[in-house]
Image: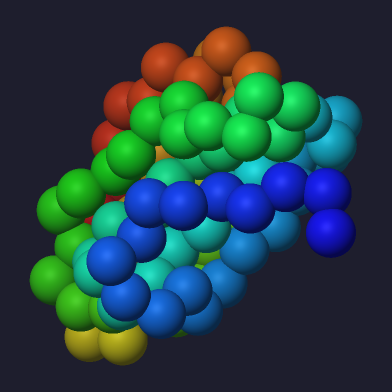
Amino acid sequence: MLTVLRGHTGAVNSCGFSPDGRVAISGGDDKTLRLWDIRAGSQILGFKGFTGKITSCSFSPDDTQILAGDNRGLVLIFRIMSASRANAEKIKS
């Protein structure tokens, strides 16, 4: 094991790496989506606003958007500058 990322207050249901491999994303039962700096082992940014438990999340291939969905049917797309320079903006709900 390389690093333990702590922050979610419930089960983690989905996670993945950014295309460049420097950042991870996770979503879970606590209705939050979190971006993680892999090298530092720390949270970069957290997203709230979901109505249910996050069941799926992923980066776009060009590292400029995050797609996430919850168990109540809400799907959000966040635009980011890049995963390693996370500055998010919700663009659809």
Tell me where residue 46 appears, x and y as whole percent. Answer: 33, 39
Picture residue at 71% right of the left edge, 34% below the top: 38
Picture residue at 84% right of the left edge, 36% below the top: 21
Tell me where residue 14 appears, x and y as whole percent. Answer: 56, 72
Judging depth in this view, the residue of 28 and 55 nearest the camera is 28
Classify the position of the N terminus by image quarter.
bottom right
Picture residue at 62% right of the left edge, 63% below the top: 15
- Answer whether residue 70 is visible to the viewer in this image: no
Judging depth in this view, the residue of 58 and 37 nearest the camera is 37
**Quadrant in the picture for residue 73:** bottom left
Q: Is residue 79 above or below residue 6?
A: above
**Quadrant in the picture for residue 69:** bottom left
Tell me where residue 74 appears, x and y as whole percent. Answer: 26, 72
Q: Is residue 9 above or below residue 83?
A: below
The answer to whether residue 56 is left or right of residue 47 is right
- Answer whether residue 42 is visible to the viewer in this image: yes
Picture residue at 50% right of the left edge, 79% below the top: 13
Q: Is residue 87 above or below residue 10?
A: above
Judging depth in this view, the residue of 25 and 4 nearest the camera is 4
The mark total stands at 0
Tell me where residue 49 appears, x and y as whole percent. Answer: 15, 53
Classify the position of the C terminus by image quarter.
bottom left
